[in-house]
Amino acid sequence: MAVAAETRPDPAALLAWYDRHRRRLPWRAEPDERADPYRVWLSEIMLQQTTVTAAGPYFLRFLDRFPDVGALAAASLDDVLRLWAGLGYYSRARNLHACAQAVMARHGGRFPASEAELLALPGVGPYTAAAIAAIAFDLPAAVVDGNVERVVTRLFALETPLPAAKPEIRRLTGLLAPATRPGDFAQAMMDLGAAICTPRRPACALCPWREPCAARRAGTQETFPRKAPKAERPTRRGVVFWVERPDGAALLRSRPPKGLLGGMTEAPTGRWAADVDLSLPVDALAAEAPLAAQWRRTPGLVTHVFTHFALELAVLAARVPAGTPAPAGARWVAAAELAGEALPSVFRKVAAHAGAGRGGGA
């Protein structure tokens, strides 16, 4: 799709709007400040699959604990995972740590400016590389997140559904980006999508690009972006075992470093599969239990939705004598230390469901 000069949105109009209405965000530099590449990178990794509201507190905690890339690189992966717990998509945390170490080892602790060098870093994809290059180094780059996809597909009434439309959206964004203030332009596009060009009921009357917007002229703005039908998300089921001692210590273990929730802390669990029958008697459900105990089933199920599947967990709880040794690969964690463990959201749900630390295993 060509962009005719008479219908092309004017970047100057968007930048003027941005200068008046820019969001104040914890990672965003003030108008008279130079952006910190470390803060830009950290925020962009956190904002993948996460909202600004959810990422903000995590960003501030990370910055307090790891004020620069050297401090993050020197930390243990366990410390990083603990601080990340609850933010989801845990491969991001592992890549965050690996990337910090790569920046120290390959670039002397300074983030490279070029997209090509940024793309060579662990966990840095095309979007993140473009965002760092534009925002931190003010280099021309096509920065396309979900907000920008929505803005561009409406501006040009782009009929190709996502995700097939992504290359064309990136091309059109590159055509729109000005040679001057590319970092501000990238952030202006994001702010426009977040504040004006919203998924439902966009505030078109307030938009600096309302005149050249093809979808607005046709009255179809809320129908964009077009999206391909989503595949049905399958459901897996499993059994998780919550074991406590009389002092409230819980039996936990670390998941394998690779794969789903890699390196995170979990309560012992059996396999997760579509054919697991949660209607079986407790004795049958306890076949994969980590130790012998008097198991009881807690009422209801713990449910959680991952990107590619939904999960239903039956929780079997037990209380064991004080001297019970932890099975191989597991460990006892004091009740007061549970909050500091790298428990992902699904296992925090399990702990709450089992009444962790309140005699729930009795």
Image (cartoon, rainbow, N blue to C red):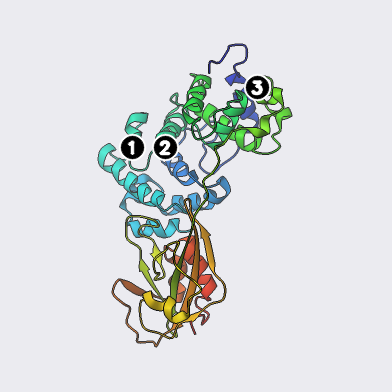
Q: x, y percentage for residue 127?
A: 44, 34
**Reading the chain from its start, which is encountered first: label 3 or label 1?**
1
Q: Is residue 308 visible?
A: yes
- Residue 92 circle label: none
Under circle 3, the secondary element is helix
Q: Is residue 119 above or below residue 182?
A: below
Q: x, y percentage for residue 356?
A: 50, 75
Q: Residues within 10 Å of mark 3 (few under 14, many from 20)?
A: some
Q: Is residue 289 visible?
A: no
Tag 3 residue:
214
Whether residues under marks 2 and 1 lie with C-beta atoms below 8 angstroms apart, the answer is yes
- From mark 3 to mark 1, how far is it between C-alphas? 42 Å
Whether residues under marks 3 and 2 lie with C-beta atoms below 8 angstroms apart, the answer is no
The outermost residue toward the left is: 105
Tag 1 residue:
110
- From mark 3 to mark 2, how far is it between C-alphas? 36 Å
Amino acid of disc 2: Pro
Q: Is residue 82 shown left or right of residue 172? A: left
- From mark 2 to mark 1, how far is it between C-alphas? 8 Å
Of residues 225 and 108, which is closer to you in this image? Answer: 225
Residue plotted at (43% across, 74% down): 241
Residue plotted at (65% across, 19% down): 212
